[in-house]
Image (cartoon, helix red, strand yellow):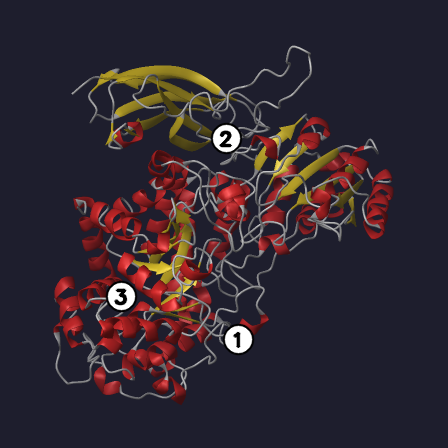
């Protein structure tokens, strides 16, 4: 049954999102005024009958408005609410409405229009004059919305959707680090601010629904979309996902999370057209993969979810009545609408082969619980067979009404029926990419930095070096800071730019790329050692020659958008291409060397960890990444991030992640009777790991009460002191372990964290609360329960760096 908390959340959101219709001004549109007689200040005569119908009345209840509108809708008008039109440059041929729109299937309306007029990155066909300046775009979106309000029979507004996992997917919007970088900050308040900025920029540009966040767990680093995930851990992902959702939705914009469900662990980490056969047990599905989505629904009141491509236990999610209806709606109380990932419906035939024609895929997905189909082909492809299925009686009208009601509910909650337009397009020029938002972007790049190694080289003293070599394929790379799912046409500060500006005239900065991200031998050279291509050898030699004349080497290596991301799984986690050759040759010069990693997945950088003096993990940062990196290297900022994923030593250890079932990742004997080493033990860097230029001391642990019933909260307090010389951030982490349980559970579980900034010598008291839901497991009967017994408490700087120990007892009911 729907939870009371969910119902309250939706009531509050509906009250917040409904606003009186504005008095329309001509300058909010592109073309001259028409049909102005339908606008009455406090309401809009959407069906143009001269009467305020219930669905047009802002004071009527949400359910009454939905029911009134449904009664007036024809089958044609209902079925088009169940489909997406991809915007200009993808499927839509027109930037603005034309006379032909009155002959298209959307003459009766549309569920949503995706990525319209946003000049999406890496797609020249989508470049449009209406993406910039922001005010022009807002007016163009108003013009498109105007067609649905004024030129369709019932005036049902369209929901304009867009991507937004690294900031809004729009030209000139504020950019942020990839989600894996955002999570490395372990700062829930920062993620909420990122959500608010993303939502604010979306709303002022006319977008009312943002496809963010990604709530998949990054359990296999070979998978290409690890860069888009927060973490391998369900608790960290749940907390940050909730903050992003509430941040976005606080701006009257729906958040649609991806990808529901069990999407991030395809067999072997394979991506592309595969994305199938997640080999995880039902208990792991419930205890790990569903946790972030359940939190999104029951605690954050999320309005949208995207159904994933994959199957689970042989049933594709997009055709699963259990996942889309029984679990999501009946058990969790979800009241929003489910949109398919692109081609998830067609994939029931082409990928999973559970249907022998497209019409059957439509039937299966709609009956399972899908509300809106999305794909890169015209809406008619879905709508036509859907109408046939209704006419044939295979899909009952009650099912159609249920699916359409969900779509309408979200549109009403967003205030689209009462205020369908951007009321002040001129304000967009001040809001999109504002100075205040840029400061949050810079701070997010700073906080995402993780110091992996430092033998004393860092922080660098700028007065100690006369000539500095900045090398590596990511030294001047712009590509990693620009995402298909984030802002385009942004002014990126590269690593080279950031260092050169910070150092100024105190030292000479020279540059040599050293090598490309990969050469013509890649990815074959992931399988066996190959001599670098001649042009790559020459680049390496040039970098070495430059290094010999320098006093310091800063080398930036890692990924670009072609080696990690959607459809970019790998069989190796080594640095791509010839980058290992580059750093090894630079090291041989004997010059001090700091390595900057700009990457989207954990890397098996065992050689670097052994030999490089310093390693700074930057992930894929925002447009200000180069500035943040330079500040950290030269001590203007003390990196305090922690890893949200485990770095294995080799792909042979995979799966190797956190949390892990008891005894599943313990060290193995490395010598057999004949004395031959056979196994590699342990992580290269464990979950939660990250160094600092200063040191922190933990103390005074208190766990209260020491004995509690299963419904009680447990309070954990301790002190944290900066005992070093630098101001710094520490991420204090709280873990628990269920000493004895009826089923095998996890060695440790993360149940709390706090990022704290301390001056040298400063002490703060930290308080965290362990909630009953943090203690649950799925027992032998697959019921979620809190079992009585002793729980160990661990507080520390990472999952393996435990500083304080305690325990409490849960007594039997």
Q: Is residue 555 left or right of residue 159?
A: right
Q: Position of residue 314 (x, y in %)?
A: 39, 47
Q: Residue at x 46, y 53 (%)?
A: 165
Q: Nearer the viewer, residue 678 or 147?
A: 678
* Residue marked by disc 3: 411
Mark drawn on residue 719: none
Q: Position of residue 417 (x, y in %)?
A: 24, 71
Query: How much space separates mark 2 and mark 3, taking CA atoms?
Result: 40 Å
Q: Position of residue 245 (x, y in %)?
A: 35, 50
Q: Nearer the viewer, residue 344 or 180?
A: 344
Q: Residue at x 36, y 15 (%)?
A: 806
Is there a contact, CB below 8 Å, between mark 2 and mark 1?
no
Mark drawn on residue 128: 1
Q: Secondary structure at mark 1?
A: loop
Whether residue 416 is situated above or below residue 265 in the rendered picture: below
Residue 75, can we see it?
A: yes
Neighbor class of circle 3 (other Cα within 10 Å; few <14, some 14-19, many 20+) is: many
Mark drawn on residue 687: 2
- Sequence-wise, which precedes: disc 2 or disc 3? 3
Q: Residue at x 75, y 50 (%)?
A: 521
Residue 21, can we see it?
A: no
- Sequence-wise, which precedes: disc 1 or disc 3? 1
Tell me the mark number nearer the camera, choosing from 2 and 1.
2
> In the figure, residue 604 lies in which quadrant?
top right
């Amino acid at each position: 049954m729907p939870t009371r908390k969910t119902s309250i959340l939706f009531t509050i959101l509906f009250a917040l999102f409904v606003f009186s219709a504005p008095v329309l001004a001509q300058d909010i549109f592109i073309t001259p005024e028409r049909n102005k007689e339908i606008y009455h200040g406090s309401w809009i005569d959407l069906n143009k009958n001269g009467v305020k119908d219930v669905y047009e009345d802002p004071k009527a209840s949400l359910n009454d408005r939905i029911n009134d509108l449904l009664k007036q809708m024809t089958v044609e008008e209902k079925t088009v609410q169940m489909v997406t039109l991809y915007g200009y440059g993808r499927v839509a041929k027109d930037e603005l409405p034309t006379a032909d729109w009155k002959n298209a299937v959307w003459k009766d309306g549309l569920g949503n229009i995706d990525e319209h007029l946003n000049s999406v990155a890496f797609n020249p066909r989508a470049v449009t004059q209406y993406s910039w300046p922001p005010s022009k775009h807002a007016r163009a979106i108003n013009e498109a919305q105007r067609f649905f309000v004024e030129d369709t029979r019932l005036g049902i507004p369209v929901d304009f959707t867009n991507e937004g996992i690294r900031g809004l997917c729009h030209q000139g919007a504020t950019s942020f680090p990839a989600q894996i970088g955002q999570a490395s900050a372990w700062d829930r308040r920062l993620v909420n601010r990122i959500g608010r900025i993303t939502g604010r920029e979306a709303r002022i540009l006319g977008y009312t629904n943002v496809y963010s966040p990604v709530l998949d767990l990054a359990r296999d680093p070979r998978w290409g979309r690890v860069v888009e995930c927060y973490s391998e851990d369900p608790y960290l992902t749940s907390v940050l996902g909730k903050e992003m959702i509430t941040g976005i939705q606080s701006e009257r914009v729906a958040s649609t999370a991806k990808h529901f469900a069990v999407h991030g662990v395809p067999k072997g980490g394979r991506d592309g057209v595969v994305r199938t056969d997640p080999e995880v047990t039902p208990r792991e599905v419930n205890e790990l993969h569903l946790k972030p989505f359940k939190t999104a629904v029951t605690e954050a009141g999320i309005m949208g979810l995207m159904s994933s491509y994959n199957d689970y236990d042989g049933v594709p999610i997009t055709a699963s009545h259990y996942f889309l209806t029984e679990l999501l709606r009946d058990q969790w109380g979800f009241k929003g609408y489910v949109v398919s990932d692109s081609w998830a419906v067609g994939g029931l035939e082409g990928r999973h082969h559970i249907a022998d024609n497209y019409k059957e895929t439509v039937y299966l997905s709609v009956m399972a619980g899908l509300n809106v189909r999305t794909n890169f082909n015209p809406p008619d492809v879905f709508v036509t067979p859907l109408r046939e299925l209704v006419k044939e009686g295979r899909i009952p009208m009650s099912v159609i009404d249920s699916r359409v009601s969900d779509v309408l509910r979200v549109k009403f909650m967003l205030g689209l029926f009462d205020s369908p337009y951007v009321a002040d397009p001129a304000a967009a020029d001040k809001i999109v990419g504002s100075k205040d938002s840029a400061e949050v972007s810079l701070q997010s790049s700073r906080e995402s930095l993780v110091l992996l190694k430092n033998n004393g080289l860092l922080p660098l003293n700028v007065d100690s070096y006369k000539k500095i070599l900045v090398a590596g394929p990511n030294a001047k790379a712009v590509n990693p800071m620009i995402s298909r799912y984030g802002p385009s046409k942004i002014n990126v500060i590269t690593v080279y730019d950031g260092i050169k500006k910070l150092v100024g005239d105190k030292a000479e900065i020279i540059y040599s790329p050293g090598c490309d991200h990969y050469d013509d031998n890649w990815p074959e050279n992931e399988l066996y050692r190959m001599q670098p291509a001649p042009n790559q050898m020459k680049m390496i030699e040039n970098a070495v020659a430059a290094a010999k004349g320098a006093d310091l080497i800063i080398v930036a290596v890692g990924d670009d958008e072609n080696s990690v991301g959607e459809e970019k799984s790998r069989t190796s986690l080594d640095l791509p291409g010839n980058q290992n050759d580059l750093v090894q040759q630079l090291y041989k010069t004997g010059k001090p060397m700091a390595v900057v990693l700009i990457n989207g997945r954990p890397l098996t950088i065992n050689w670097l960890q052994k030999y490089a003096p310093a390693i700074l993990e930057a992930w894929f940062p925002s447009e200000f990444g180069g500035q943040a990196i330079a500040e950290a290297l030269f001590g203007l900022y003390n990196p305090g991030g922690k890893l949200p994923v485990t770095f294995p030593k080799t792909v042979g250890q995979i799966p190797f992640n956190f949390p892990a079932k008891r005894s599943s990742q313990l060290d193995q004997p490395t010598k057999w009777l004949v004395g031959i080493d056979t196994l590699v033990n342990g992580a290269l860097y464990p979950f939660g790991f990250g160094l600092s230029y200063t040191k922190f001391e933990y103390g005074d642990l208190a766990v209260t009460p020491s004995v509690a019933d299963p419904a009680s909260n447990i309070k954990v307090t301790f002190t944290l002191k900066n005992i070093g010389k630098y101001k710094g951030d520490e991420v204090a982490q709280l873990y628990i372990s269920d000493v004895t349980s009826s089923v095998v559970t996890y060695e440790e579980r993360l149940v709390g964290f706090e990022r704290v900034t301390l001056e040298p010598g400063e002490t703060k008291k930290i308080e965290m609360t362990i909630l009953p839901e943090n203690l649950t497991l799925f027992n032998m009967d697959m019921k979620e329960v809190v079992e009585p017994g002793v729980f160990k408490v661990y507080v520390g700087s990472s999952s393996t760096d435990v500083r304080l120990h305690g325990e409490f007892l849960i007594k039997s009911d």
